[in-house]
């Protein structure tokens, strides 16, 4: 029997994401709670028509055997969710409106057709907090019903050259993401510089979250292609991941 599977997870920027980078996640005033939840103050409207949170409907229509996609949101407070769609020509309009009111948690599920997206277009949503209360988005995702039962697994390849601070921060971020760790086989860090990340003062602390999933490989500087090729080689040799993210 077909089961609901998450295609894309709702994601909120980290505290370290400042300035223009926050526009990759949302447009408007909100306060982050964690990686997947936020608070929208009363009277504020937030758009998630962004790189990380909009749903590429035309892509999924073209490359997957799917007829519909479902937006799932878990929210608190009183407000309204408006779902928009766009076309390949840049036109957009509201597709659905869902009002939620009352105490407690509201579980919202909206099924949306993929048939109209033959030549391009996206779905996204906006959330409006009504007067007198804030709205909390506790979690959200885009999902679809599929007969596929196997869950794909992934490895990650990182190539670095004399950027130990940045690389240690990235390792720490990956290790703190529980949902990622559930499907992660390995993180291959190909260190091609002479400022080694393993010599960084915070490396051991940052690496704890990944544990034995972290593999640091030191080699000469073969450029970006040489570093990423090494990650491909290591993934093929391990023969346990369905995908490699570079």
Image: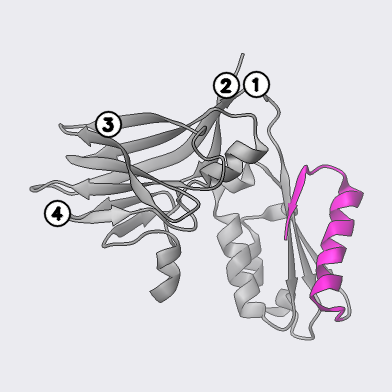
Q: Could you tell me which residue is drawn at 86 percent across and 72 percent down? A: 226
Closer to the chain start, of discs 3 and 1, is: 3
- Residue 85 picture location, percent across and down: 40, 45
The reply, left or right, for residue 6 in relation to residue 38 is right
Q: Is label 4 in a helix, a strand or a loop?
A: loop
Q: Quadrant of the C terminus?
A: bottom right
Q: Could you tell me which residue is drawn at 37 percent across and 50 percent down? A: 92
Query: Is residue 201 in view from this perspective?
Result: no
Q: In which quarter of the image is residue 148?
A: top right
CB-based contact (under 8 Å), mark 1 and mark 2: yes
Closer to the chain start, of discs 3 and 2, is: 2
- Residue highlighted by disc 3: 106
- Residue highlighted by disc 2: 3
- Residue 156 picture location, percent across and down: 72, 56
- Image: magenta residue range: 221-246
Label 4 to label 3: alpha-carbon separation: 19 Å
CB-based contact (under 8 Å), mark 4 and mark 1: no
Closer to the chain start, of discs 2 and 4, is: 2
Q: Main secondary structure of the magenta part?
A: helix
Q: Is label 3 in a helix, a strand or a loop?
A: strand
Q: Is label 2 in a helix, a strand or a loop?
A: strand
Q: Disc 3 or disc 1, which is closer to the eye? A: 1
Q: Could you tell me which residue is drawn at 43 percent across and 59 percent down? A: 25
The reply, left or right, for residue 42 in relation to residue 149 is left
Q: Is label 1 in a helix, a strand or a loop?
A: loop
Label 3 to label 2: alpha-carbon separation: 22 Å
Q: Nearer the viewer, residue 58 or 24?
A: 58
CB-based contact (under 8 Å), mark 3 and mark 2: no
Q: Count residues near mark 1 (Cα–Cα under 10 Å), then give few for <14, some for 14-19, many for 20+.
A: few
- Residue highlighted by disc 1: 147
Q: Nearer the viewer, residue 184 or 213?
A: 184
């Amino acid at each position: 029997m077909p089961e609901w599977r998450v295609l894309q997870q709702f994601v909120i920027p980290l505290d370290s994401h400042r300035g223009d980078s926050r526009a990759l996640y949302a447009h408007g005033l909100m306060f982050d709670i964690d990686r997947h939840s936020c608070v929208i103050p009363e009277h504020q409207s937030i758009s998630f028509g962004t790189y990380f949170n909009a749903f590429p409907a035309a892509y999924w229509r073209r490359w997957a055997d799917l007829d519909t996609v479902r937006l799932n949101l878990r929210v608190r407070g009183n407000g309204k969710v408006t779902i928009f769609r766009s076309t390949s020509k840049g036109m957009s309009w509201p597709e659905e409106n869902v009002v939620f009111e009352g105490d407690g948690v509201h579980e919202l599920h909206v099924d949306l057709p993929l048939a109209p997206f033959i030549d391009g277009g996206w779905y996204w949503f906006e959330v409006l907090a009504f007067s007198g209360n804030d709205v909390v988005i506790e979690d959200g995702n885009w999902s679809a019903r599929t007969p596929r039962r196997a869950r794909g697994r992934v490895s990650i390849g990182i190539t670095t050259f004399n950027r130990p601070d940045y690389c240690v921060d990235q390792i720490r971020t990956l290790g703190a993401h529980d949902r990622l760790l559930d499907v992660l086989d390995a993180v291959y860090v190909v260190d091609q510089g002479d400022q080694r990340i393993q010599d960084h003062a915070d490396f051991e602390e940052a690496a704890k979250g990944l544990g034995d999933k972290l593999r640091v490989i030191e080699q000469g500087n073969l450029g970006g292609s040489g570093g990423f090729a090494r990650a491909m080689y290591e993934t093929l040799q391990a023969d346990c991941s369905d995908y490699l993210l570079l």
